[in-house]
Image: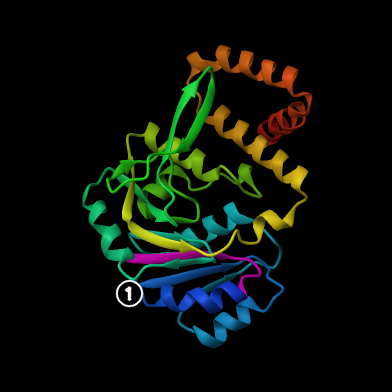
């Protein structure tokens, strides 16, 4: 079973200086970095210090979902470790992860990120409610694989179509992928032994004003719901959506934005 690491990079030189040596020592077959038009010298740092790494360079900023898709397209491993640029993997991550893929129905393994547990969720009144599951030492089925700390079977990623670019610039593309994988009968495992250290919030939240960032999250949540909701839940969803807009009129903005994105995609 061959292995790749894919890391989307944007102005991440200071993170790569701290973390890339740990990634390089994981013992995987290849490392693919996708530089999303960084302006801080990240590509030059990679070329100079890690010449064996496969580097994809975007001339313009394409954002997270497209960067990840490009990385998977370049990767050749059976299992692809998808890591954020600001993650430091533990040395036994690959060993602890690969054992789960002996089950052909396992689509992904999502990691124990700073003690963050698995994703739990259920449909309530036509809306998807989710939370972190109970943190313990057991394996759990997770609702989705984390977009920044997980390992994914590449052939199934290709079968499912990877991240949907409709979620650009990001948020909830991993939820959508997880829901689609579960609908196809695949499993997503959270293993507390698969540990990574997340050192910072990264650059994405700093790219937008707080209000716009909130609208992006709310818009993408609705898109993920609309893509994956079962038909019998639509009446309850519409009622819940009307109630939410009535209580919080500002919610009309991301709702209309999500509708427009769906219509033009």
Span of residues in magenta: 1-13
Q: Is residue 92 above or below residue 237?
A: below
* Residue 10 included in the magenta stretch of the image: yes
Report which residue position mark 1 lands on. 27
- The answer to whether residue 184 is seen in the rendering is yes
Q: Which residue is drawn at 54% across and 60% down?
A: 70
Q: In this view, does 2 lie to the left or right of 54?
A: left
Q: Is residue 237 above or below residue 96?
A: above
Q: Is residue 227 left or right of residue 120?
A: right
Q: Is mark 1 on a helix, strand or loop?
A: loop
Q: Where is residue 94 in the image (x, y as percent from the top left)?
A: 31, 65
Q: Which of 233 and 227 is in front in this view?
A: 233
* Residue 180 included in the magenta stretch of the image: no
Q: Residue at x 66, y 70 (%)?
A: 11
Q: Where is residue 208 in the image (x, y as percent from the top left)?
A: 75, 52
Q: Is residue 263 above or below residue 145?
A: above
Q: Is residue 76 left or right of residue 260?
A: left
Q: Which image quarter holds the C terminus?
A: top right
Q: Which residue is drawn at 51% across and 38% down?
A: 176
Q: Which image quarter holds the N terminus?
A: bottom left
Q: Where is residue 86 in the image (x, y as percent from the top left)?
A: 54, 66
- The answer to whether residue 150 is seen in the rendering is no
Q: Is residue 26 above or below residue 100?
A: below
Q: Where is residue 222 in the image (x, y as percent from the top left)?
A: 62, 31
Q: Nearer the viewer, residue 125 or 234?
A: 125
Q: Which residue is drawn at 70% across and 41% down?
A: 214
Q: How crowded is mark 1: few (under 14 residues within 10 Å), some or many (20 or more)?
A: some
Q: In this view, does 132 lie to the left or right of 214?
A: left
């Amino acid at each position: 079973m061959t292995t790749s690491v894919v890391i989307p990079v944007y102005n991440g030189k200071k993170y790569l200086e701290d973390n890339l040596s740990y990634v390089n020592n994981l013992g995987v077959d290849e490392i693919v970095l996708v530089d999303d038009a960084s302006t801080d010298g990240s590509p030059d740092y990679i070329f100079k210090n890690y010449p064996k790494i496969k580097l994809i360079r975007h001339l313009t900023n394409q954002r997270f979902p497209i960067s990840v898709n490009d990385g998977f397209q370049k990767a050749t491993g059976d299992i692809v470790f998808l890591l954020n640029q600001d993650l430091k993997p533990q040395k036994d991550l690959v060993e602890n992860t690969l054992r789960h893929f002996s089950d052909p129905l396992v689509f992904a393994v999502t990691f124990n990120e700073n003690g963050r547990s698995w994703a739990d969720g259920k449909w309530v009144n036509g809306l998807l409610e989710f939370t972190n599951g109970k943190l313990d030492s057991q394996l759990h089925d997770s609702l989705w694989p984390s977009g920044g700390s997980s390992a994914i079977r590449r052939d199934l990623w290709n079968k499912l179509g990877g991240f949907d670019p409709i979620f650009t610039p990001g948020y909830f593309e991993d939820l959508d992928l997880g829901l689609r994988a579960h609908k196809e009968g695949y499993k997503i495992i959270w293993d507390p032994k698969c540990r990574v250290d997340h050192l910072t919030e990264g650059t994405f939240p700093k790219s937008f004003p707080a209000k716009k960032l909130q609208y992006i999250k709310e818009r993408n949540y609705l898109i993920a719901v609309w893509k994956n909701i079962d038909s019998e839940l639509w009446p309850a969803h519409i009622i819940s959506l009307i109630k939410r807009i009535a209580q919080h009129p500002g919610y009309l903005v991301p709702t209309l934005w999500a509708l427009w994105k769906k219509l033009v995609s």
